[in-house]
Amino acid sequence: MADIILHIAGGLIFLSITCGVVRLVIGRTVVDRVVAIDMLTVISISLIALYAHISGRFVYIDVALVYGLLSFLAVLAIARFLERRS
Amino acid sequence: MLELLVILVCAGILASGVLAVCLSNLLAAMISAGLASLFAAVSYVLLAAPDVAMAEAAIGSGLATLIFLYTIRRTGGGREL
């Protein structure tokens, strides 16, 4: 049962990475791309957490934690820059 | 399944790298470069190197993006040069 759920999660992550990259490539404005990269960050964090569960090494959770903090800061800085420019 | 995810992440590195070179808007190119380092960090985790991934996430995705942003603001204001 848990194996099926992990496979479904892997498939959903696969699908959403594809959709995010397509949005990033098409993206008409900069704001579209910022939202796409924010979404891809969240997907990457979930991918790292899934891999930590599959491989059984819980050191990888720390990477996801650091990643979430830093990507939040980067997106915040970009948003502030866009607000100041407009 | 995991091999498929590794291939997808590597394709993401490739796509965002090409996009970072090809885009004319400086801000969008900077975002694409940040995405390349994001996928690189994920691939480091998948290749069983969590400390390298942590350094890549801190420097490549966090610090480099902020420094690029500061530079764009101080020089061109994000306009096309």
Image (cartoon, coloured by chain):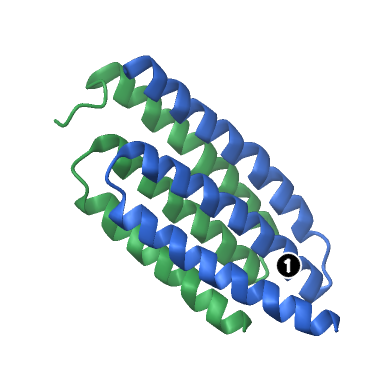
Chain colours: A blue, B green
Report in which chain the residue with disc 1 lies: A
Occupied quadrant, residue A22: bottom left
- The location of residue A72, given as percent across then percent down, is 60, 36
Q: Nearer the viewer, residue A1 or B71?
A: A1
Residue B56, how many percent across, how many down?
56, 50
Which residue is located at x 46 percent, y 43 percent?
A35
Q: Residue at x 27, y 59 (%)?
A: B18
* As drawn, A77 above or below A8: above
- Say whether residue A69 is left or right of residue B71: right
**x 52%, y 54%: residue:** A40
Task: Classify residue B64 as left or right of residue A42.
Answer: left
The quadrant of the image that shows the C terminus of chain A is top left
Quarter of the picture containing the N terminus of chain A is bottom right
Q: Residues within 10 Å of mark 1 (few under 14, many from 20)?
A: some
Q: Amino acid at mark 1?
A: Leu
Task: List x then y, in percent, for residue B17.
Answer: 33, 57
Residue, disc 1: A50
Instruction: Judge left or right: residue A76 versus residue A22.
Output: right
Residue depicted at x 38% and y 37%:
A31
Q: In the displayed structure, would residue B64 be above or below residue B1? A: above
